[in-house]
Amino acid sequence: MTTPARQRPSPGAGILWTALRRNLGAMARGTLLMGMYQAGETAFPIALGLIVEHTMRDRSLGALALSIAALAVIITTVSLSWRFGMRILQKANTTEAHRWRVRVAACGLQPVARDVDLKSGEVLTIATEDADQTADIIEVVPLLVSSLVAVLVAAVALGVADIRLGLLVLVGTVAILSILSVMSKRIGAGTREQQARVARAGAKVADLISGLRPLHGFGGNHPAFLSYRKVSTEAKRQAITVARVNGAYEGAALALNALLAAAVTLTAGWLAFERRITIGELVMAVGLAQFIIEPLKLFSEMPKYVMMARASAERMALVLAAPPVMGPGSGLPAAGGDLAVDSVRYGTLRGLSFRVPAGQFVAIAAYQPRAAAELASILAVNVPPDAYEGLVRVGGRQIADLSIEAVREHMLVNPYDGEIFAGTLRTNIDPSGTSGMVPEAVEASMLTDVVALHREGLDHGVRDRGANLSGGQRQRLSLARALAADTDVLVLHDPTTAVDAVTEQLIARNIAQLRRGRTTVVLTSSPALLDAADRVLVLDDGVITAADTHRNLLATDEKYCLAVAR
């Protein structure tokens, strides 16, 4: 007989347990204070019943004054315990949400990408809405416990008056929670689907914003709008479905709670009519019947909030628990080393091999743009080494044996569509604030005219995605950032496609001068950059077909001449 394998807990459950574990202290204090609040709320109708009982029996002003003082103490306890209890819980909730937002952001910024089939807009939704809803578990558990305290205190008080009243509250509470727990499962499933569709709509918006300029250029605004409208409509329909389920859940909870309160009130009235409880106990029972509607409502809503937190935690786990695309090594490349590509097969690359000696400026003229993009992705380690055949060596060491951090520090691959961030020119060029090459990088990239245009100079504000810069200015700003990094090996992919021919000539000459003695590779078809290079490699049909200077290739290779001549 085989023993069934134990079911491993889901990553979402692990995230919730982590949140609860590291907030035990705050939750314990919050639970104590919220329990005092609920106990005080419950004590109020009990105290009223006792006041009526003693007033009718003793008719003493002293007893009345003592009762009023007791009510004042109860009211003060209720007020202060709620105030400080919610302060503690909301602070812990906010802090926990911040922790998860930072963790999701850190995963996105790690050198090794994670194997997640999510767009940036979806990750943004996870890092904001889902992080907040996951952290709500910090408030849900103490409120659940305090509501349970209120129901138990009410049941005990009613049981003292008559055991049937106490049992009615306990049995009714269990029945209500059993019914609502079944309904809450549907809410959890619907919420997960709603969150997924909202995230897809957010990803669509992010894609449209990043492609806004090209859309304007070819008149694709309206089709793009219709595409987003379709995705958003799907999210709206799912939200309406979830709202219907939530409405049914809350309506059922309110109706069941009201039925229980009515049953307690009618039972207490019948017992008083039969003289089995006193008038004071009847007042207490009626007051408790009215009071327990609130904690019962709160108690019955907790399964719904738990399911929502669980759904959000599962979505966060898509990012946090995803394995890395590749397992990084631990080696370090040799300083100032060369770059070698040996028999690489990937996409359109058909056994690509070449070597760039340390300190040399090499340009690669790719006749097929896709081949250049694939080579740049491999060198940037956006493609894991086990996803292609062949080897790539940096500083004499295989990339697969090196830590990703070491590769990034030693070799920078600057894409042709380098992102521009909101901030200033200076923070875009030198994000860490540690480069000593900012003036030289600005001059080499011909960004000096942009700096001179503004009174603030390098501190001139830049909008998100460089919205207040032209295409050429954004490209030169990205190039300045790459040059300011001053890495041993620099790979540039089409760094001058958006600038004019004169500026391109100056940039090519400046790059050659600034990077003299450092290994530099430029993937380009620009005649200016090809002419500035020490050597040109021709990449055609996935392999290197020629290697010489730009001018020699122009004189001897007709296909090369046709491909790069402008």
Image (cartoon, helix red, strand yellow):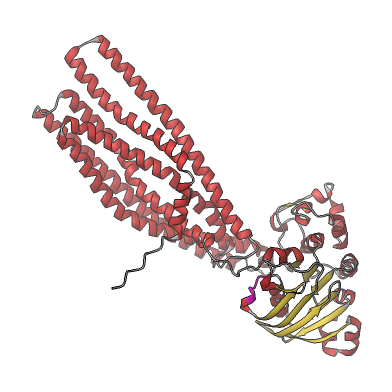
- Kindly give the residue lying farthest to the left in the view shown: 274
Quarter of the figure with residue 219:
bottom right
- Residue 151 placement (x, y as % from top left): 28, 38
Residue placed most toward the observer, 172 or 234 = 172
**Quarter of the image containing the N terminus?**
bottom left
What range of the chain is rendered magenta? Answer: 381-385
Q: In this view, does 231 lie above or below 422?
A: below
- 418 part of magenta stretch: no
- 383 part of magenta stretch: yes
Q: In this view, does 84 lie above or below 538?
A: above
**Quarter of the image containing the C terminus?**
bottom right
Residue at horizontal 69%, vertical 72%? 399
**Left or right of residue 269, residue 429 in this image:** right
**Left or right of residue 72, residue 382 in this image:** right
Q: In this view, does 69 lie above or below 82?
A: above
- Kindly give the residue lying farthest to the top in the view shown: 61
